[in-house]
Structures are given as structure tokens and as C-alpha cells.
Amino acid sequence: MSRIKGYGRIDRTRTVAFTFDGVTYTGHPGDTLASALLAHGVHAVGTSVKFGRPRGIGAAWVEDPTGLVQIEEPFPEPMLLAATVELTDGLVARGLAGQGRLAEVADTARYDRKHTHCDRLVVGAGPAGLLAARSAARRGERVVLVDDRADAGGSLTGTEVIDGRPSREFVAEVVAELAAAPEVLHLQRTTAFGQYDDGFVLALERRTDHLGTAAPRNLSRQRVHRIRARHVVVATGAHERPVVFADNDRPGIMLASAARDYLHRYGVLAGREVVVFTTNDSAYTAALDLEHAGARVTVLDARPDAPEHWAALCRERSIAVRPGSAVVGTTGDRRITGVDTVTAGKAESLPCDLLLTSGGWNPAAHLFSHVRGALRYDPALGAFRPAEPVPGVSVIGAANGTFDLAGCLRDGAGDDAPATPAEPETAPLVLWRTEGDPARQFVDIQRDATVADIERAVGAGLRSVEHIKRYTTIGTAHDQGKTSGVIASGIVAELLGKPVEDTGTTTFRPPYTPVAFAALAGRERGKLFDPERITSLHSWHVAAGAVFEDVGQWKRARFYPAPHENMDAAVLRECAAVRGGVGILDGSTLGKIDVQGPDAAELLDRLYTNMVSTLKVGRVRYGVMCGNDGMVFDDGTVLRLAEDRFLVVTTTGGAARVLDWMEEWLQTEWPDLRVHLTSVTEQWSVFPVVGPRSRDVIAAAFPHLDVSNEAFPFMSWQDTEVDGVPVRIARISFSGELAFEVNVNSWYARAMWLRLLSAGARWNITPYGTETMHVLRAEKGYPIVGQDTDGTVSPHDLGLGWAVSKKKRDFVGKRSFSRPENTNPERKQLVSLLPADARTRLPEGSQVVEFRPDGALPPPPVPMLGHVTSSYHSAELGRPFALALVKGGQSRIGDTVHVPVDGALVPAEIGGIVLVDPEGARRDG
């Protein structure tokens, strides 16, 4: 074991068991999978995606480019970093060959989201972030502090001194003060993975992952916080970057800061014979800490002169320091066993079981970049840092290129910053790679992408780092180039002989770290992914044996089969009942939009192709909406309820789309119009009572209402009441039959439905479903938007030219009607098709082709005239029929065409779209 007594924040009083690659190990609460494996001397965790080379643990957190594992228990999850997986009892994992596999069992965990508003969001609970949050809390601001690690403090290990005491004590004091502040929300294990305009930040909280199977089932596993902040403070720290050299991908090579992190967080000494290769001062703290924990350490400093302060401390500890040294290669198989070095031109090999690298630090300015914050290259740091400020966003601490502790404390607290001993600092050396074989110098270790790959890209003429990224795949793996991206920019600049600032860096985009789709979905999975909407009568329909279909999000009764009836038999029976007697439909799913305001009529005039402003109160008008291209967008009826109020009725599937369309025009194009729009779809239940006996049923149900044609004409509405409940009845027909639509508050829907059934029992009133409704409307040639249209159909194509006003100065889509193509007589037009054999039901979607006397299709490509849009058996006609969009259809009435069905050509005659009661005599009973 490599546990060191006196180090770490884990709970050593308890032990947990886990399995990796079939071997059982133990760890402690607070461990990560990576720290527990390292404690057992396991460095190799998998193999690389392209070359199959061994891969190990390269860092201690999300910047690790190599330590990928597949979790098998408690739930299969692919492509997770061992460094970020918190250890739980019973965890089962295995190493990966560069890529994982998706789970084959359902994820039963819960996920959710939460909306939060604050004055100041601070991202990162390191020294700068903690003090920024505390300062804001002391000013009385509403503060949200998020940090992705298990506890606050960032890189502070406890060896630092702040205000005269160990830094961990100081951190605990600040955390306690924040916890006591009523307006502060402090979230650890929470990663801000995307920042967007207007202070909007998405953050993922891992609520129970660290609890494993002991997690309460009533708590969500992960939660997405949707945070809206007046001001965002980015205090996300920095990522240490490596230096590229030959065979720099072996297990046992990791970042210097990672080895220090494993020691102080988990009490794990990652190696006993340690070589530290550095270009800057920060790695010396790791060298000193590991030597204090019992390792033998050699420091190779690439700078010609080692900093005297650190060199003196190292001499006191018997740590060898070699200035002007570089690592040019490594040896070993499943773990590093030695390094090849060059010092002042002299080559030498050093044995080691751990190689730590530090090529400087890159500010983690990803969130700043997400809102188009510009980055500029700082040649002193060899890194890109925030340039011009972005309104509403501050970047502080290491994320802004301030790498000393005193500077981070000042960034967070300003003049109230606590005191900390000054640290001498020597300028770093910017070094991207050392000498060696480019084909063995790995830039992106996860992608197996090398310096040779960059050379090949540059040789192919690529100059942009964005293009080179995609050519080489550098920076496209799970770590998104956190360690490789800036190095790639530096190497490209070297190869092109250009300054790095001219080369630039790739664009950082959300998410900062991978986020599970389940977390993004939250509770919107399964039935909640696309919510199922049901009418107030759903339970009645179920009890009546209805077969349902999905219409948009609604569950609608499709038909009501009697015993031993299939759909065709049930629909024929229902159709005959409506045409010969009376039927009733639950039409509550139709979209209903309440339009109110002094300019309501003007708005509707602009949106509908026909006039609405001339509609009188108490009357109803059919209308068509078109898009900008003049193609049918939706249709329905409009009831004028008052001079300044209308009820717009839309198709079931188009309700939300139409409301959004109306709001878009109202809010963005015509904000001067005084109109308010409100969806009332679910507030009103609608029951069409249809058929020649429908007047009798309505008269029986509403005895005080005069339902004669004279008192209640077609396309009008009247208000009445039953037992004090308001009811609105409209004379509207979607079947061509005499019909009344009964509208009632949905609270009273069931009572009204039962009243109508009772009133119609004498005439054997028959509930019918959507399939029957479709047959009835198709027999009358009434199109359904979305079934008989496909976004390329104009009102004229549907035979609805009469609904397009020639008097109106303008309306949405009007200009498009004058386009030559929209008046082309060869456009596809809606017609009926009657199969010649009077038996074949033409499948919907079937193509329509020219009539062939030989009954055989011509060789491909076969010219298509159009396609079948609707097809049914008709009880009224005693035969099947169809509607179809056919080129020049109106001019071809009487012609015969062919429709391929099951490998044979079925002849069908083109006819007009009104097949039942073309005179319209049934409409008034």
C-alpha cells in the first residue's frame, strides 16, 4: 500500500471494497477510484484507442487525458475518469481500450433540474472564489457558490499559511460563514459546464453519486441547476500543462500538481522513486511534499538556472536539482521504469517509478470563452488568458493568470485580503516539447495524436489551429484539450515559424466536462419526455373500450370497437351512425386561443388569408393561416365573442405552433398592436354532436334553446346554461352533416358528456372516434393540415382559393401568391381517387403514376405525379376512396392513373374532392 500516515482527508476509520478489472481492492470513504488504485500501486488502467498502448492515471481531476474507465456497478456508465469517480462500496469498474460501451439496462436513478436566481454567481471555491463569495455575502447580495470538487479550498493543501494559520482552517472558517449567511447557496460537487448570455449558467450537481447503493431513492442522483445571475465571477483556477517528449504516454507519468493532490487529499504517495521535470517554480512544492512523505526525488529544471530559493530548500532535503535538464524519452512497459534525460548536451538515464511534469499553467477560462470572451496570449506565462472584459462577467485568480496565493486572495477580497507569506517567483520557461521522434511524442494522449500528426497537417497546408484540431483530432476527446490544446497551438506556431499569438487557440464550447444525457433530460424521460395529455373524459373513453391514438401530445379515442370488431368494422359502423342518425365526438383537444384587445381584429386580419374584422359578434368564420411562403400553415375556425375578443380554434397538433407563430409576429413585428393571447385549450371541452338527428339531441339537452335554422343559423354560436353552468354552442360542421359543437368548462365535461348521451339515447347516439371523423371529413373533401399538406401546399392547391381574400391589402404570405410557381397549373392539387375495382384501399403515401395500358411500370426513374394523402373505406359510398396530391389534378378530373400497390398497378379515377352531398343539403338538416 502507498498510503502515508498523517496525510489526506479521507475517512480511514471505514473501509469500502471495490472491484477493478476483476480484482477486488479496498479503499476509504472520500477516495476516488484513481486514488484507491494508486494506493494499491495500480497505475495502468487501460489501453489507447488507436495504438493499444498502456494508459494510466495522468491527473487528479477533470484534466486527466488518460484514466478512462467503464463503471459496471452500481450502474453501467461508459467513459468516466477514474480521477473523478468517487469510491463507493461495491463499485465495479474496468479499464478501457480508449472507448466504452453504452448501458444495456435501464437507468432507474432520478434526475431533475432547479431554477435559481442570484445577484452574484461565483464559480470555483478556491482561495479567490471563496473570498469573492464571502465579500458579496457581506454586502448583502444573494450569492451562489459552486465548485466541482467534494470540498472547498481548491488547490490549498493545508501546508499554506493564511492569516497566520493553516490554509485548511481558514477555508473551514470561510465556509462556515457562508453557511450561516441566509442569502448564500453553496454547492460542492457541482460543475458549471456552460455559460450563456445574460448571466445564464448551467451547472451539474452530483448529489448522490458518492453514496453509491446507500443513496436515498427519493433524492435525484444528479441535478442541473439553471442559474440566472446579475454578475458571474469565474474563479475556476488553472490547468497544469505537461511538456511533450518521446513516450510521454506511459503509465506512471502524471502532472506534478496531481501527485501533490493525491498526497494531500487522499494520503497516497504515487511513487517512491520520483523524477520531476519542470519549467517553472510550482513543481518544486510537489517535489518537497513528496520527499517529506518518503519519496526519493530528483528535479530536472529545463531553465538554465534553477531558482535559488527552491534549490536551497531542495538541498536541505537532499533533493537533487539539475538545471538545464530535459526529459527526451522514457522506458517501461505497464509502468514507467526510467527516463532519458539531456543536461547540457549530456545524455543520461535515471531510474524512476513516477515522472511528474509541469510545463506551466493554462487559465481555465472556458466559461469566459463561452460568452465570446476574447483570450490573448501571454508570452510570459506561455498561456492564453482573458483579454477584454465581458459585461456581467469577472475572471479572477488563476483563471485570469494570477498564480500566486497572495494575488488570488487579493482578487477575491480586494483590500480586505488576508495576509499570506510572499513566495519568491522566477520567470517560467515556455517549452512545448523536447527533442525526439515526433511519431512517439504524444500531444493528445487520449486520441493517440502526436507531433508527427501536426507536422502532417501543416505539411498539407493547414494553418488554422481549428482546422488542425479537426485534422488531427487533438482536443476532441473527453478532456476537450485541457492539457493538449495550448501545447498544440505552441507546436503549430513553432512549425510555422510564427508567434503563438498569431496562431491563436481553439474555441472553448459547452459543456466544460461531459454531462450525461439523463441529467440533461431530468425528469423528462419515458412518458414525461413528451408529456401525454388526456382530456377530461379519458377515463370514460377507457371504460368504453376505446382504442387510442397519439395526436400531438394528446391521447385521442380513435374508435370504439364492439365485441369481435376490428377497426375497419368499427369505423364503418360509426360512420353509418353519424350519417344516418347522430354521433358524438370528444373534440376537446382542438387548440383554442383567446385573442383580446382593441387591435385583435387587425392582428387576425394580418394572420389569416381571409377577412376576420368583418365578422359579426355571434358568428363563426373558417380561416386559413399561411407561412411567409404562402403555403398552408394551419386552419380552423374563428368565433367573434365581442368587438375586441375572438376565440381562435386550431388543429390539435398545431395549437402550440400557432400560438408561438402569433406571439412571434405580435412581439417582434407588430409590438404596437394592443392584443393579448392566451391558450385556453385545456379550459374548454368541446363535444361535436353530429348527424341528421343532432338538432333533436341538442333540443332535448337544452330545452330553453331555439335550435331552428332561423334562430340558430350555420356558422353562428350562442351562449346558454345548464343548472347554472355556462355553455357555448356553435353550429360548425367538419362532416358536412347538421352539427352542433357544445363547449363547456372542463370541470363540467363529464357531466355534460353524460347529459348529451342521455339526451340522445332515444336516437341511439353513438360515440365515435378520430378515425371516423377523418372518414367523414375526407368524404366532404375537407383537408387535414399535416396529413393532406406537407409544407408545399397552398390554399389554392387544396381548393380553398375562396378563403384567400382579394380585397385585403396585405396578410402573411400574400406576396407569395403572386409568384409564378404558385400559380403554375401543374402544381400538385388535392383531388379524390376512386380505385376502378371498387375494392382496393390505396395505402396512404403510395405514389401516383401515369396510366400504363400494359399495366407495367416503366424502367426507373419512374415519373411520379403525386401521392396518396388520405385513404379510407366509406360506408356512405360503399367502397374505398382516397385523397391525393396530383400534378395538375384539377385539370385531370376524369382521367385514370395508376397507383402501385403490393407490386401491381391499381387503376384509379381522378375526381373532385367532394364525394358526399356535393350540394351541401345535409348541412342544415
Image (tube, rainbow, N blue to C red):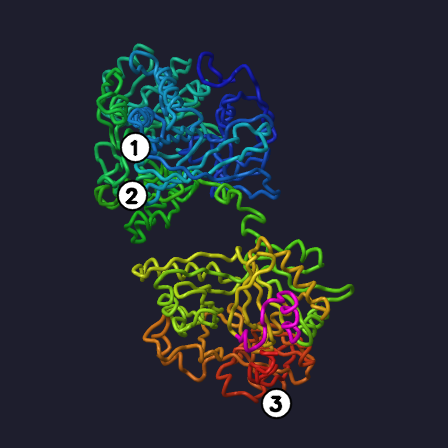
Region in magenta: 691-714
Using the image, determine if residue 378 lies above or below residue 171: below
Q: Which residue is at a point 29% across and 14% down the rendered structure image?
A: 163
Using the image, determine if residue 750 lies above or below residue 497: below
Q: CA distance from mark 1 to mark 3?
A: 78 Å
Q: Which residue is at a point 51% across and 65% down the rendered structure image?
A: 651
Q: Could you say where residue 643 lies in the image, as x and y percent from the top left?
A: 39, 66
Q: Is residue 341 magenta?
A: no
Q: Quadrant of the C terminus?
A: bottom right
Residue that numbered label 1 is attached to: 399
Classify mark 3: residues with Cα within 10 Å, few (<14), some (14-19) or many (20+).
few
**Is there a contact, CB below 8 Å, between mark 1 and mark 3?**
no
The answer to whether one can see residue 902 in this image is: no
Left or right: residue 304 versus residue 797 is left
Classify mark 1: residues with Cα within 10 Å, few (<14), some (14-19) or many (20+).
many
Q: Could you say where residue 591 lies in the image, as x and y percent from the top left?
A: 50, 61
Residues 373 and 701: in front is 701
In the rendered structure, which amino acid carries the disc numbered 2? Thr
Q: CA distance from mark 1 to mark 2?
A: 16 Å
Residue that numbered label 2 is attached to: 505
Tell me which label, 1 or 2, sits earlier in the chain: 1
Tell me which label, 2 or 3, sits earlier in the chain: 2
Residues 332 and 9: in front is 9
**Is there a contact, CB below 8 Å, between mark 2 and mark 3?**
no
Q: Quick one: SS at disc 3?
A: loop
Using the image, determine if residue 421 lies above or below residue 455: above
Residue that numbered label 3 is attached to: 853
Q: Give the residue furthest to the front.
A: 704
Left or right: residue 61 versus residue 906 is left
In the rendered structure, which amino acid carries the disc numbered 3? Pro
In the rendered structure, which amino acid carries the disc numbered 1? Ala
